[in-house]
Amino acid sequence: MKNMTDKMFTKEELQEIRSKFKYVDHDFEGTNRLFFDNAGGSLRLIKAEEEFKRIDELPDASEHSNKLALYLADVENKGREDIKSVIFNAKSGVIYPGFTASQIMMEIVRVISDNAKGTNYVTTTLEHPSAYDAITYYSKKNNCEMRVAGVNISTGGIDVDAVTSLIDSETAILCCMAASNISGYIYDIEKIFKKAREINPEIYIICDAVQHAPHGILDPEKYGIDAMNIAPYKFFGIRGFSIAYLSDRIASFAHHRLLGKASDEWEIGSPAPAHFAAISAIVDYVAELGEKHGNGETNRRKLFEMGMKRISDHERGLLYMMLEGTENVKGLRYVDGLTVKMDGTDLYTRDLIMSIEFANMSCEQAVEEYEKRNTVTFERSASSLYSKRMVEAFDSKGVVRLSPLHVNSPEEIEEFLRVSQEISRL
């Protein structure tokens, strides 16, 4: 753990990175603040917003034949290629765009459950409600047993055996996320999905990657995943657009589509080229980060992987500082009256998301105190349908979720730690 900060961005690199994002250290009114709620919607890449606006202002229909329509079609196709080949690293399968990742997830579960054969579905306690509730609904609808893997309180995650021990030859669907949006724990999906297919080669595998996408590399074909969704608004991009990768195995299952189109076509209605342009801007940004250490590499996916590696290295350094502190201020692990929940010791199994509790106040009160001090966090409370199942699994009534981003600096982490100490003494 001693070298966790060695691969962070230099001060000069970080200054350049921060200049590419909107409202990094202040809000639209000019008020200085720390924004540590990126898990609810990340800071926006300026170029993604600019490209969205530039393309969206064009009235031409990309499915028509005039000059600008054909230009928009090219923009769309580049975006589709960036999604499929770069973000998902897929050589086969199709892309399924939609309005929200939750809608996409529920539709995927519906379509697969209509075709999957078996007597039980397996999922985990930490799944997003869109996945967990869809699995609950369709397991009941299809008279299948629902099996739920429990948490490891120490690590904040789900152990491999906790999932695979529930799978048998009659398991129709496995729905297991890539990383938790409450603890930051990164699931070992390679081991989980490999073992699942050994037990039952016919199992259908669904993976929610919404939370992990801004922090790590996705590779659904490598892991035998049938469906994986992401949400660009948590990945430096635009709200109102989400995407899933679907394997060839499920792409032609009966689903809502125009009947004159191919059986594996999942886009319905007029496309929105601006959203695809914004995605390409995000891929450009990450690939450029990789290019700085790329030694002449030109493959876009490989550059993207290098860029994401640099992002995760910097974020791991920030995570280490938050937990252990610096020579100037002590870390959250050592603040009296404050507990870091789900505090796994292996930081390589954690994205830059964590949850804390204060002994002197509720999570809702703590979030208010942070905002009084110009720091934006978020309460994950047992009173919320989005949080109840997860926080109660960790013997908690609620936590303050902290989710910085790779644009944050060591100085901002130190500022946050001082604010946290102040709140703990109230």
Image (cartoon, grey):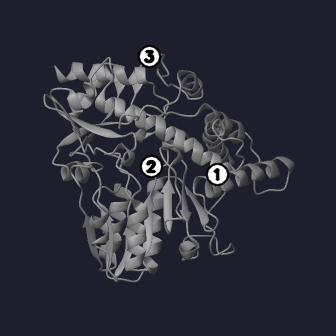
Q: Give the residue number, with chain letter if any, for mark 3.
A: 31
Residue of label 1: 301
Out of 252 and 21, give the one closest to the viewer.
Answer: 21
Count every numbered label the image shows and give the total.
3
In contact (CB < 8 Å): disc 1 and disc 3: no
Look at label 1 and name its amino acid.
Arg
**Which element is circle 1 on?**
helix
Residue that numbered label 2 is attached to: 212
Q: Are marks 3 and 2 in contact (CB under 8 Å)?
A: no
Q: Which mark lies nearer to you, 1 or 3?
A: 1
As measured in the structure, the alpha-carbon distance from the residue carrying label 3 to the one carrying label 2 is 30 Å
Q: Nearer the viewer, residue 363 or 423?
A: 423
Q: Earlier in the sequence, mark 3 or mark 2?
A: 3
Residue under the point 85% across and 52% down = 66
Circle 2: element type? loop
Residue 148 locus on image (x, y percent): 26, 66
Q: Residue placed at 23% from the left, 29% from the top?
A: 366
Q: Of helix, strand and loop, which one carries label 3? A: loop
Is residue 221 depicted above or below 302 in this figure?
A: below
In the figure, residue 122 lies in which quadrant? bottom left
Amino acid type for the residue under numbered disc 3? Thr
